Image (cartoon, rainbow, N blue to C red):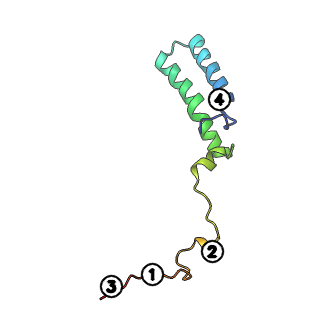
Amino acid sequence: MLSAGNPYVLPSVLVAAGAYLALTVLTDASVLIRIGVLVFVAGVVPIALNRVLGGSTDDLSAESPDPPTDDPTDDPDDGSHAESVDEPTG
């Protein structure tokens, strides 16, 4: 999700850096609050935007299984395969 294929990563990182600097200059917020805002805006927001707005499909292809094929030769229960049965001799 947080990859180069996600078009929301770079803008979110730039906004997060600006928010961190603004919190540093304009407020006396603690370091934990500033880093929390930085991580939220740079890490969580692009993933959420990518899921909500669609984004790239590169991440979806890695997560989804292969589509089923309609190849009749792959079906073991189609009745065309004869099972060999070993009969005891003697």
Q: As rendered, which of 52 and 62 lies closer to the eye?
A: 62
- Which residue occupies 56% across, 24% down? 38
Locate residue 1: give its quadrant: top right
Locate residue 86: give its quadrant: bottom left
Identified by mark 4, the residue type is: Ser
Name the residue beneath numbered marker 3.
Answer: 88
Name the residue beneath numbered marker 4.
Answer: 12
Residue at the extreme left: 90
Find out whether the residues at labels 3 and 2 contact each other: C-beta distance under 8 Å. no
Identified by mark 3, the residue type is: Pro
Against 70, is 47 above or below? above
Locate residue 74: give its quadrant: bottom right
Residue 82, percent from left and from top: 51, 82
Q: Which label's residue is closer to the chain start, 4 or 1?
A: 4
Circle 2 or circle 1, nearest the eye: 1
Circle 4 or circle 3, nearest the eye: 3
Identified by mark 1, the residue type is: Ser
- How many marks do you count on the picture? 4
Circle 1 or circle 3, nearest the eye: 3
Q: Which label's residue is closer to the chain start, 2 or 1?
A: 2
Name the residue beneath numbered marker 2.
Answer: 72
